[in-house]
Structures are given as structure tokens and as C-alpha cells.
Amino acid sequence: MLRIFAAVQTLRAGHKKDNKNKKITAKKGPIKAAFAVGIALFSASSLPAIAAKKVTEIPLHYLRLVPEARPVLSNILPPPKDLGEAGAELAIADSNTTGRFLGQHYTLNSQRFDEADALLKAAESIIKKDAVVLVDVPTALMAQLDKQAKEKGALLFNVANPDDALRTSQCLNNTFHTYPSRSMLTDALAQWLAGRRFSQWFLIAGPTEGDQAYLAALKRSAKRFGGKIVDEKSWSFDTDLRRTAQKELPLFTQAEDYDVVLVADEEGDFGHYVPYNTWLPRPVAGTQGLTPVAWHRVVEQWGAAQLQSRFIRQQERNMQSEDYAAWAAVRSVAEAVTQNRKDPKAYEASHIQQFLLSDKFHLAAFKGHKLTYRDWNGQLRQPIPLVQPRSLVSQSPQAGYLHPVTELDTLGFDRQESQCEMKNTL
């Protein structure tokens, strides 16, 4: 390096002399070339030192149960096969961008199953000491996996299950929830309806377990935010609405005067045909129409457009709620590890859990708020966008809804409404 520096200085001296005698033959070319050679040689000489830097491998796992979907009337837009997994992959790439400067390398092992028994068998070898596992499974499996995590000293992230029971009565001490609960979604919608004085509700619910759970969340939100249920009907028809929606739905939605029709149809069996086919000319909201979601392609404020564009470049499709929840889970782990990188225990599941539940953690997640976890049930506090297919209508919590801790706790079950008290059990 000293020889390179001396050569550069010699060229500089010669250049100055030529400039003084007005015999310049090139404009700074030799100096630029010498500096370029010097930088290249310096970089090459530094590579062994960089390569020799110790890199800590941080493996994450993703377990997803994808049973065969039942047929529905509206199947125009089937869910992507990599739903959720794609968000985790983007977060891995994001984390490795900074991780390579900190000696950290994140990897993701994703597995899909069509049967619960096969998933549980695979989980036996994956869920072990200090493992971090993202899971997309029904409630019954969620409880079994959480029990394994407690026994083995692992940490789970629920990235797709909205069941309120997992946050209120069926408490999971080793599981964080980055996907919002149903009550968070319906509370977000009910706040907006109250602000617009849409107080007279007409409810329509499908027959599935998820539909009935969404209906229960709507009823709870009605009591909480002043909604009055003027009528409630169950959808039990098996007619082809693609042919008969204009005849069937106006008759089905006959009722006393109402301000809004609220639909509980999580699988999209009939709800897509309700807008513009109601007996009274009224807005439609819930699982269809104006919809509360964790994420949607129309969210572009607070730097979200940058996240959206990176996701589209990597996956060639739009980011959905499950993708966002998985992204938030991976980024939560990376944030915990990065903030505590000088601590030798930073990579342990118990240390990650403790940090995520502390006041020191917050996640910048493109929603206009710093996101934190509720320390009693592990739910990620987050604003809820209210969207229609091509625009963002609003985002809850709405202005004016206050809370002694954070306005984000006006969405979903609050501490006193939950039986859970999440503790560091690992």
C-alpha cells in the first residue's frame, strides 16, 4: 500500500510540474487511473479479512398446513400457492442486507403439508431448543405446536390464524401473533362506521366455522362502538349466484331500514355478489365490500410503496395480509437479534421473547406507527387499513378513540378482557 501511495504522489508531482510549464497532455487521467488502481488493490487486499469475519447463521422455519379447499361459487382469484411464505422470504432478504455487515446470515426453511399428521411429525424435528418457527395452522394444531415449543424451548409466530380464543382464553405463552385477530379487524371497521354514523346494521353470515366466528366478532364490536343490529340472516343457499344474484339477493336483503350491510363470508362463497344487489341502496362491508385487512396493495403511505415495489419485484404479485404478517415476524426476530448483537445470548429464543415483550422493542413496519407486542397475549399491535379493491378508504384506530396506554389497544381485546398473561417461559 505504501508503494501505491508513493506512485500516486509521484504522478501528482509530475502533473503539477507539467501544469506549471503548460505542457499538460491529459486532464487528470493519470491521477484518476492511479487512484482507481490503488482502490482496487486495497479492496483486493481487504477481502481475506472480510471473508475471515465470523458469520452467525440464524435459521428460521415456516410450517404451513394447506388442506384441499372446498369449492366456492366465486373462485376467480384463488390464493397464491406461496401465500405467507413470500413475505417471509422478502424479510429474509431485507435482514441479510444489513446482516452481512453485522456478521449475521438468516435462512428460511419452508414446508407445506396437506395433512395435520404429516405436519406434526415434521414439527418434532424442527421445534427444538432455540428454534424460531412461523406457523400457519388451525387453532387445534396451534395449541399442540405451542405445547411442543414450551417443552423444547422454541418460539413460534402465528402468521395467519385470526382466532380470538388464541388471544383471550386459549393462551399460548410461547407464541407471538403477527396476524391481527378477528376482533381487531371488526373493531377497526366498527370505529369507522361509528364515525360515519352508520349505526343501523344488517348482518349476513355464512355457515362455516370461520363465518360464525367473524359474526361473533361483529356483534361484539357493535356493542363496543354503538352499532345496532336491526336484522340478521344466515346464508344457506346453494344456488349459482353467478346467474341469479340480481334476483336472489334483493329479496334476501329485505328488512327494516338499515345503514349498512355487514357480511361474514371468510371463504368468499357468496359475499362478493352482495354489493350493488341489496334491497336498499346501502354500502356493504365486512369480509367483502369495505374490508378491514392486515395489508393490501393499495397501502402506499408511510413508505409502504417501497415495500410493495420490492415485494412485486421479488414475487411478481401483490403483497397480501398473510405475506405481511410473515414479513413482520421475521423482521421482529431480526430486530431483536440486531439490537442485542453484543449479547452472547441474543440468538436464544428466550432472549428474543424477552426483548419482544419489553419496552425496548418496536418495529418500523410501514403503517404510520411503531408496532409493539402486547405483553399479555403476544399480539402485535398494529393499525388496520380499511380498503376497497382499488383504494385505501381509511385506517383505524380512528381519530378520537383514546386509550391510557396506546390508541392501538382500542382494537381487539384489551388486557382486562383477556385471561392471558404472557410470561418468559423459555
Image (tube, rainbow, N blue to C red):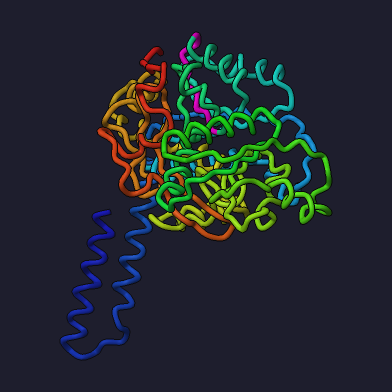
Q: Position of residue 314 (x, y in %)?
A: 57, 52
Above or below: residue 38 compared with residue 367? below
Q: Residue at x 70, y 20 (%)?
A: 116
The C terminus: image quadrant: top left
Q: Residue farthest to the front?
A: 256
- What's drawn in magenta, residue-wise? 151-159
Residue drawn at x 35%, y 28% as measured from the top left = 356
Res. 94 image quadrant: top left
Q: Nearer the viewer, residue 243 or 34?
A: 243
The vertical placement of 229 against 28, above or below, is above
Q: Position of residue 344 (x, y in %)?
A: 32, 22
Q: Decide which of 251, 404 is in the foreground and name it.
A: 251
**Residue 280: x, y in percent?**
63, 55
Q: Is residue 293 left or right of residue 232?
A: left
Residue beneath the point at 69% across and 55% down: 277
Q: For this view, does 297 lie left or right of residue 55?
A: right
Quarter of the image for the N terminus: give it: bottom left
Residue 64 is situated, as x and y percent measured from the top left of the image, at 64, 29
Residue 356 among magenta residues: no
In the image: residue 104, left or right of residue 319: left
Residue 90 visible in this rendered orientation of the protein: no
Q: Nearer the viewer, residue 90 or 201?
A: 201
**Up/down of 303 relative to 377, above or below:** below
Instruction: Answer left or right for 125 relative to 45.
Output: right
Please say whether residue 269 is visible from this viewpoint.
Answer: yes
* Residue 143 falls in image quadrant: top right
The one nearer the camera, 69 or 109, is 69
What residue appears at the point 35 percent right and 31 percent down from the top-left corner?
336
